[in-house]
Image (spheres, coloured by chain):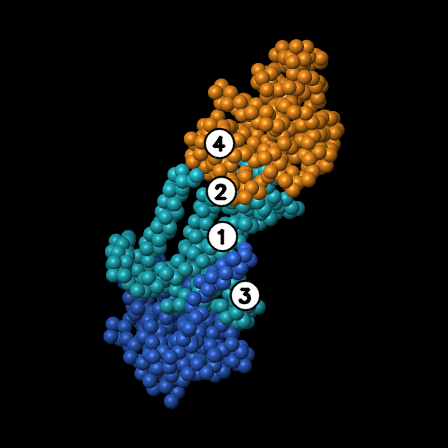
Chain colours: A blue, B orange, C cyan
Amino acid sequence: MTRRTRLHALIALLLGLASPHALAENPFIVVQSTTSTENSGLFGHLLPLFTKKSGIDVRVVAVGTGQAIKNAANGDGDVLLVHDKASEEKFVAEGEGVERHDLMYNDFVIVGPDRDPAHISGESDVIAAVKRIAEAKVPFISRGDDSGTHKAELRLWTDAGIDAKGQSGTWYKEVGQSMGATLNTAIGMDAYALTDRATWSSFKNRADHKIMVQGDKRLFNQYGVILVNPAKHSNVKHAEGHAFIDWLLSREGQEAIAAFRIDGEQQFFPNAAR
Amino acid sequence: MQLAPGQCTSGLRHAVLPISGTGLAYRRAGRAIIDGVDIEIGSARGVVVILGPNGAGKSVLFRVLAGLLIPDSGVVTWGGTPPDRQRAQRIGFVFQRPVMLRRSALANVVYVLAAAGVPSKERLALARHALEQARLLGIASSSARNLSGGEQQRLALVRALVTRPDLVFLDEPTSNLDLASTVAIECLVRRACDGGTRFALVTQDLGQARRLASEVIFMDLGRVLERTPVDAFFRSPRTPQALAYLEGKIVL
Amino acid sequence: MQHVGDALALAITLIGSLDPGLFEIVALSLEVSLTAVAVAGMIGLPLGALIAVGRFPGRAVVITVVNALMGLPPVVVGLLVYMLLSNSGPLGVLELLYTPTAMIVAQTILVTPIVTALTRQTIDDLKVEYDDQLRVLGRSPLQKTATLLWEGRHSLLTALLAGFGRAIAEVGAVIIVGGNINHVTRTMTTAIALETSKGDLALALALGLILLTLAFAANAIVMTARINAHQPVYG
């Protein structure tokens, strides 16, 4: 072999090593979604059911809502599944998505240390509760990352008439991280935090933190699913993406969502339009 | 088995000898290390030795003539033409501190043969023969860097001679060595000399100069002051600096 | 600190039970990082040697830049590679985003400056010792480079090890360009990040201990090879 053919063979070998997964792949779609749905384990339960039925693999990129939307707007995903209705509707209005569908809901809860320095445990009015946290100036950890959870949290401060962001760095701390990382920080600092129930149920580092406030209608958390617009991004696998969304919205998919439980408790409540 | 004279250098048409420098000058840190040197070596058989006190510019002159340093002014020629990389293999250089490759003694010699273009099936035999002639066959498979100073320098000389160069520069080859190694080196030089290789030697060992050289070039402060046959130089040097040197007055 | 005890026990259980999930992420980590180091070596070893041996204007600037690039933040590299490979980026047509290949690309970018800079330093030091001798032997710059690379092989191996250490330990780059997709682009470090964010600190730590063991093993293998190499085996 001449030196040149040896070089070519080496490059081919390395490229081959580098992408073994390129050979004989199942069809797949990429779903941009949030850490709350991934970390709770919902996808681990749901996706194998879809793949078994359709033969399509679902690859989930789980990041903050803001990042998921941005990625989808770049065309780096086929389906968007997040929980921030305002941003989702904007996504569709700007032509990035085809249509938004209600998928399922769960709720947010406020968690805090057992000793409850702000005395909010059992409070049914979440606005009253956050007012008490602000007045007592007890530590509160915010996700601070433009996620669905973060935006929901900000709405609570606004409704309570409190400028929490203006006091960032004092009792109110913005960490700019995923739900789990935010919870780790809250546990570590003996602080309160707003979290979705599913993440909390599956969270393993609770120390002595407990759910302090739940049930208020304002803690309602709606999830939506959108197909990324193939007219804008020609790489979108819109047949497979459609198949996934259709399945999620179908009776079978909705029942599968309802069937997901942690410690026997249902975490997500399907509410797709019939 | 030995290479016939010119066997590995066949195809290189131009001679490398004599090596000559005209108007050579080299300055560093404001000081003239060599200053207006005209010199020609290698035109006669045998060993020419350059003597002089420390700082006289002897080593620098060797490096300039061997093509390792570019002079600030002046011209160096090999056989009438400027030095070039191809012909460099026909000139050997043994440094004061031997430079050994991180491999066995034998592999060091094989490396030099390979660099000279000797076909691979001949290299091993030639290398073994060269080591045998220098009575170094016993350390052939030892790691070269772990040899004693004397063994390394003998190996360096064997390496320089194995390609049958036209001329070898020896820059204080034995100043760090014990007596036995010095004797062995001088023996190798004498034998190679008899075989036609020419040498240029820098040494501080006056006895060595007398034993090996046929001609003396005396340098001081960057200039060539004398060039005389060896016996005449030691009997009656012509310049006062040479006289002072021989009488040990210049210590610098 | 009770996590540490749990982590140790968990690590042993995972290894002992030949947990397939564990082996999947270990295999991917090794595949990505070893390939990245191999490619970085193919680029960095000759490049570093040529910078060391070469004489060209701006050489000092080049050396400074390469040294500085050793400190490239992984997350920044991840971001830049993401923008390159994104479907709305210039190389989107390659469809490499969220694949192990993208992770290899990102880690190669991280590791190449390390290999180049350390090679350059090694060869520069060797040059001082060998340059004159090689020149009297009539070696061309290319031949000198090849000889010096072989002479410096032990230090260069350490340079590759340093690169491997950087690659196997980073998470910022691979998590952005790989997406931490289960069974596809999840490596040891991204799995550790995930388990941490799920609050499962014991599992995260267990994976961390296994990762440390891998790094130790890699270094031990190389050390053994070096010790063996010091036996005279030539001739």
Quarter in which the C terminus of chain B is drawn:
top right
Measured along the vertical axis of the image, is residue B73 above or below residue C68?
A: above
Disc 4 with disc 1 on a shared chain: no
Closer to the camera: disc 2 or disc 3?
Answer: 2
Name which residue lies at 54% across and 71% down. C93
Chain of the residue under label 1: C
Task: Give the answer, above or below, for where C106 lies relative to A58.
Answer: above
Q: Which mark is residue C41?
A: 1
**Residue at label 3?**
C84
Provide the secondary structure element on which disc 4 rests: helix
Residue nearest the viewer, comparing A141 with C215: C215
| Residue C152: mark in rendering | 2
The CA span between labels 2 and 3 is 36 Å
Asked if residue B71 shows in the view, the reply is no
State the residue at coordinates (56%, 35%).
B3
Q: Mark 2 lies on which chain?
A: C
Residue at 75% in and 28% down:
B23
Q: Name the residue under label 4.
A: B131
- Across and down, in percent, residue C201 comes to 31, 59
Q: What element carries label 1?
A: helix
Cα–Cα span, label 1 and label 2: 14 Å
Number of marks in the rendered image: 4
Q: Decide which of tag 1 and tag 2 comes sooner along the chain.
A: 1
Kindly indicate whether the residue at mark 2 contacts the one at mark 1 (C-beta within 8 angstroms): no
Depth check: A82 or C67 in front? Answer: C67
Q: Residue A168: percent from the left, percent from the top?
A: 45, 61
Circle 4 packing at 10 Å, graded few (<14), some (14-19), many (20+), is: many
Q: Which of marks 2 and 3 is nearer the N terminus?
A: 3
Amino acid type, residue under disc 3 in the picture: Leu
Give x and y (percent) for residue C195.
34, 62
